[in-house]
């Protein structure tokens, strides 16, 4: 078992402050495993809503749930959306008789239910695949290549890992999407997703995609949003600083899990990726997810002006403004674009994350951070200590 101390701590903390905590993330990322650990720590009742017996126990939900005490877990809550209204009533009881932990892997359904019924009563915790901190920073190459889904990361061999990913993609498209009421043909969505890997880490070009797939731009947008809402794709929004430069408006798009990216790109082995033109883009996406797994993504953007100045990632975190550049190269140095970003965006600090072995200062405000030092460096920044 890989220990997910950070998530456990966050979920425990939220449960003390909210009557309902909702754990959201992609399929197979480890939501149930986390919920079971939390449930095992206290008196609890566990309802797996994909299980017919659990559903039978909830045939008369009000009567059943009203008398339960302790922690009540609903795993895959989107399977029984009529629970939300009842949860609202149960969460408003005083004194609070039970708290509720929900897990879900379909954000549109769950977010709608949660926001419409449980506003002000619920805390959301987003779960992603394993990060560097969890697997050990020295394992970054393996994590990058295989991605963070537990079964892909922990597979006995790279081949077994890839097999699992292929199966995951197939199941998502052929079973999970239709269960969400999505009626787009699996083959169509797969073609779109595969095509999207060519645009990984680029500004969204809906018209280009529409042309190559022979579909309309709004249709492309709809597919993009669909893959985003099931946590497969990230849309990073542009930051608009109040300066007199024309700035880019469309989001940047990323296949969130680097392992699934490599699977969809049909890269047979790490060595092939190293010779691939998308190597730098893959690195950018991987390192970006590592940062966001620590800082959270609620206040994260990219920045680009039509004049050519760019910043891969801007995060407002713990009262500070951090910039990140992701460079696949051994010993990055300060570029003109980095100087402009530092000045125009008034960054407190700029981190240039690279795959080499050394971390070093590049200027008063900028430093190169080796990926294996990233978790420790972010932990340091979070406590306000710095250089
Ligand atoms: N921390 C972990 N260490 C090792 N293996 C893990 C860990 N978390 C999850 N796994 C493994 O990954 C797989 C998926 O885990 P789990 O069922 O908890 O995910 P899930 O998000 O609930 O998936 P689903 O969406 O399909 O319900 C399981 O085989 C589980 O044993
Ligand atoms: Mg589960």
Image: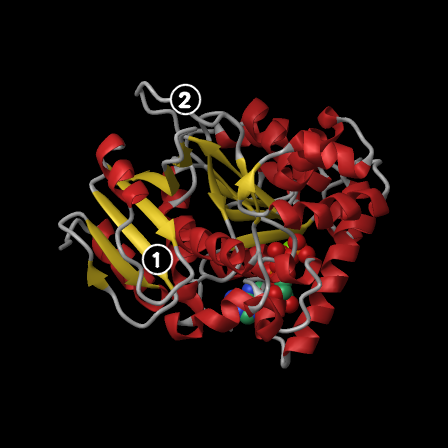
Callout 2: helix, strand or loop? Answer: loop
Closest to the observer, 156 or 190? 190
Vertically, is 142 above or below 298?
below
Q: Is residue 294 above or below residue 5?
A: above
Look at 15% across and 54% down and name the residue there: 386
Q: Tell me which residue sits at (69%, 77%) in the image.
A: 159
Q: Residues within 10 Å of mark 1 (few under 14, many from 20)?
A: many
Q: Is residue 56 visible?
A: no
Is residue 381 visible in the rendered image? The answer is yes
Q: Does label 2 point to a residue whose CB lies under 8 Å from ligand 1?
A: no
Locate ligand 2 by image quadrant. Answer: bottom right
Drawn side of residue 106 relative to residue 296, left or right: right
Which of the 4 quarters of the picture holds residue 356? bottom left
Quadrant of the frame with the C terminus: bottom left
Nearer the viewer's eye, disc 2 or disc 1? 2
Q: Residue at x 71, y 47 (%)?
A: 195
Answer with left or right where residue 219 lies relative to residue 84: right
Q: Which residue is mark 2?
A: 246
Q: Which residue is mark 1?
A: 353
Q: Residues within 10 Å of mark 2 (few under 14, many from 20)?
A: few
In the displayed structure, 98 sits above or below 293; it is above
Q: From the top left corner, tell me how far across and down residue 332 is, in percent.
A: 31, 59
For label 1, the SS is strand
Cα separation, mark 2 vs mark 1, equals: 27 Å
Residue drawn at x 29%, y 48% is: 335
Query: Which comes before the other along the chain, label 2 or label 1?
Result: 2
User: How far across and down, in percent of the image, does residue 288 sit?
Assistant: 44, 51
Percent x, y for residue 1?
51, 73
Looking at this rendering, what residue extends furthest in the bottom direction?
Answer: 156
Q: Quadrant of residue 80?
A: top right
């Amino acid at each position: 078992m890989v220990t997910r101390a950070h998530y456990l701590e966050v979920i425990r903390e939220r449960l003390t402050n909210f009557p309902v905590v909702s754990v959201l993330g992609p399929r197979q990322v480890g939501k149930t495993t986390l919920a079971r650990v939390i449930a095992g720590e206290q008196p609890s009742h566990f309802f797996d809503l994909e299980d017919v017996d659990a559903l039978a126990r909830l045939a008369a939900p009000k009567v059943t749930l009203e008398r339960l005490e302790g922690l009540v877990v609903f795993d895959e809550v989107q399977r029984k959306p009529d629970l939300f209204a009842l949860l609202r009533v149960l969460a408003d009881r005083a004194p609070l008789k039970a708290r509720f932990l929900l897990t879900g892997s379909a954000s549109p359904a769950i977010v709608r239910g949660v926001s419409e019924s449980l506003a002000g009563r619920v805390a959301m915790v987003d779960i992603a695949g394993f990060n560097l901190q969890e697997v050990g920073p020295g394992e970054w190459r393996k994590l990058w290549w295989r991605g963070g889904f537990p079964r892909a990361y922990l597979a006995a061999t790279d081949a077994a890992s890839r097999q699992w990913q292929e199966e995951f993609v197939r199941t998502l498209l052929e079973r999970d999407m239709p269960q969400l009421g999505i009626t787009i043909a699996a083959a169509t969505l797969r073609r779109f997703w595969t095509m999207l890997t060519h645009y990984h880490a680029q500004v969204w070009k809906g018209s280009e995609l529409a042309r190559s797939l022979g579909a309309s731009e709004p249709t492309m947008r709809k597919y993009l949003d669909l893959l985003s809402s099931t946590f497969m794709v990230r849309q990073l929004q542009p930051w608009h600083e109040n300066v007199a430069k024309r700035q880019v408006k469309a989001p940047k798009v990323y296949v969130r899990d680097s392992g699934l990216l490599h699977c969809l790109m049909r890269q047979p082995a790490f060595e092939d990726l190293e010779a691939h033109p998308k190597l730098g883009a893959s690195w950018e996406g991987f390192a970006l997810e590592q940062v966001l797994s620590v800082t959270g993504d609620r206040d994260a953007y990219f920045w680009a002006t039509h004049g050519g100045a760019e910043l891969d990632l801007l995060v407002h975190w713990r009262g500070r403004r951090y910039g990140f550049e992701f460079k696949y190269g051994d010993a990055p140095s300060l570029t003109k674009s980095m100087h402009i970003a530092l000045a125009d965006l008034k960054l407190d600090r700029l981190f240039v994350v690279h795959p080499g072995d050394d971390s070093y200062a590049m200027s008063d405000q900028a430093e190169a951070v080796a990926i294996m030092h990233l978790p420790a460096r972010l932990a340091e920044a979070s406590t306000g200590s710095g250089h």
